[in-house]
DNA sequence: TTAGGGTTATTT
DNA sequence: AAATAACCCTAA
């Protein structure tokens, strides 16, 4: 299963502000329903999201009970939290009590509800020894059954505000469960990137302030890749805060750093996907090999995403709105669909002058030239400098 | 990071 | 069609 699919699915499922994405549809479209094993966190997210959606709509119904039971199954074995039990209990009660609209138990659907929910549904739970059957639940069952016969008890229960308790417990459950899941994968990566880029920017400015003049080999250590969730989790809140406050100062430098990080990150993903792509290449019947040249060309077009539409994998991709096009494009290459390129921008006389000075001073150390003139050359990479110099020499 | 081969888009 | 400028990709 593709890592990227999971991450994106997770992101969309968790994004509460996107009413167009229904977790159920998304997961079944991606065929995640069957393979429970390796993506239970995805399913858990989806269930939590559905509970949350129905709460927002003011819906506490028997569908919520289904969700809570599914959630229990996803925990497989581990001990249920109190809030889970309470939420289930009070939701079940609410589902029954909402049918107490007539003045007497003998009228209306109350009796049916008790039968359906407490005899059948909860009966099944009892049979399989579910942890959801709490003492609280059993107490309520007794009361509700009594109410079928006894109009006094019926009236008393009818006037209590069960719904409020149910909503409170459900909210409590959601809060706890989301906390257990932690931040979602894409967010963690984004946070990690931000951290790294901030460190890099700090380092960069410090170097400039010192007006360094030694050899180019300073000890810049690159220890980023091997710090997954843990570090991100701890620094999370601080980073998010900083992200919002500090949007102006590091606009060009910082954003470019982040873009580069993102590029590395995408390359990493590409590497994960590569094996399957090369396997597909070996299959006969690939119409789009126009030039059967040896190694390089064939390989690169192969990895370039051409294969995405190959029917060899019959997985339906959901049609989600296309996000903003990325200017940095490691995944697409030569002949693939409209390649995302940076917008062509001519060199200003000032930039050229700075480049000329730089070459005079540092020689062909494009990196140093750029570091010496971060403002003027903010929009140029080292490679751009090299290319421009090549053009100037022609 | 850099050098060098290659592509894209625009102009001549 | 050739030339040019800016940009992209990859080996080392």
Image: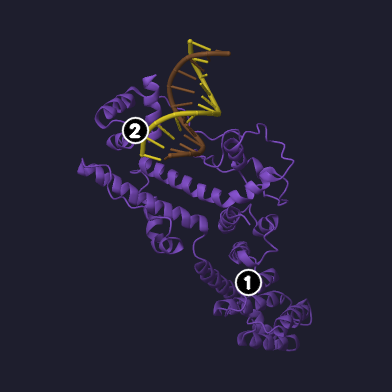
Chain colours: A purple, B yellow, C brown
Contact? badges 1 and 2 (CB < 8 Å): no
Q: Position of residue A379 (x, y in %)?
A: 38, 34
Chain identity of mark 1: A
Where on the picture, by quarter, is residue A365?
top left
Quadrant in which the N terminus of chain A is drawn: bottom right
A344 horizontally vs A64: left or right:
left
Which residue does the image show at 63% across and 82% down from the upper left?
Answer: A131
Evaluate whether residue A379 shows in this view.
no
Could you say whether the residue bearing mark 1 is in a helix, strand or loop?
helix
Where on the picture, by quarter, is residue A235?
bottom left
Q: Kindly identify which numbered label has been placed on residue A61.
A: none
Q: CA distance from mark 1 to mark 2?
A: 53 Å
Q: Earlier in the sequence, mark 1 or mark 2?
A: 1
Chain identity of mark 2: A
Q: Position of residue A146 (x, y in %)?
A: 71, 89
Q: Kindly identify which numbered label has been placed on residue A74.
A: 1
A198 horizontally vs A30: left or right:
left
Against A105, is A301 above or below? Answer: above
Camera-nearest residue between A123 and A158: A123
Could you say whether the residue bearing mark 2 is in a helix, strand or loop?
loop
Quadrant in which the C terminus of chain A is drawn: top left
Which residue does the image show at 51% across and 69% down from the upper left?
Answer: A180
Which residue does the image show at 63% across and 46% down from the upper left?
Answer: A278
Evaluate whether residue A200 shows in this view.
yes
Q: Kindly identify which numbered label has been placed on residue A377.
A: 2
Q: Nearer the viewer, mark 1 or mark 2?
A: 2
Camera-nearest residue between A185 and A352: A352
């Amino acid at each position: 299963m593709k890592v990227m699919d999971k991450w994106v699915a997770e992101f969309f499922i968790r994004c509460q502000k996107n009413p167009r994405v229904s977790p159920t549809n998304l997961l079944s479209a991606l065929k995640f329903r069957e393979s429970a094993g390796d993506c239970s966190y995805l399913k858990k997210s989806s269930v939590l999201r559905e509970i949350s959606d129905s709460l927002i709509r003011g819906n506490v119904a028997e569908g919520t009970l289904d969700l809570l039971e599914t959630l229990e199954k996803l925990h497989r074995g581990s001990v249920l939290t109190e809030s889970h039990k309470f939420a289930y209990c009070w939701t079940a009660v609410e589902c029954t009590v909402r049918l107490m609209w007539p003045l007497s138990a003998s009228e209306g659907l109350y009796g049916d509800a008790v039968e359906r929910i407490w005899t059948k549904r909860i009966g099944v739970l009892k049979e399989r020894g579910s942890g959801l059957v709490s003492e609280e639940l059993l107490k309520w069952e007794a009361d509700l059954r009594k109410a079928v016969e006894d109009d006094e008890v019926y009236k008393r229960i009818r006037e209590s505000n069960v719904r409020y308790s149910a909503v409170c417990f459900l909210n409590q459950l959601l809060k706890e469960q989301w906390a257990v899941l932690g931040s979602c994968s894409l967010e963690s990566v984004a946070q990690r990137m931000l951290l790294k880029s901030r460190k890099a920017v700090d380092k960069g400015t410090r170097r400039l302030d010192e007006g360094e003049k030694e050899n180019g080999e300073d000890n810049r250590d690159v220890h980023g890749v091997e710090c997954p969730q843990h570090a991100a989790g701890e620094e999370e809140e601080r980073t998010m805060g900083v992200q919002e406050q500090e949007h102006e100062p590091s606009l060009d430098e910082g954003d470019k750093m982040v873009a580069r990080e993102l590029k590395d990150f995408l390359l990493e993903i590409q590497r994960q996907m590569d094996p399957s792509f090369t396997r597909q290449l070996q299959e006969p019947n690939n119409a789009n090999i126009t030039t059967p040249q040896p190694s390089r060309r064939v390989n690169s077009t192969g990895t370039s995403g051409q294969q995405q539409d190959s029917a060899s994998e019959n997985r339906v991709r959901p049609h989600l709105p296309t996000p903003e096009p990325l200017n940095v494009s490691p995944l697409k290459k030569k002949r693939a669909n409209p390649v995302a390129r940076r917008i062509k921008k001519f060199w200003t006389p000032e930039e050229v002058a700075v480049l000329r000075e730089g070459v005079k001073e540092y020689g062909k150390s494009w990196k140093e030239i750029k570091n010496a003139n971060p403002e003027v050359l903010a929009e140029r990479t080292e490679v751009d400098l090299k290319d421009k110099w090549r053009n100037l020499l022609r």
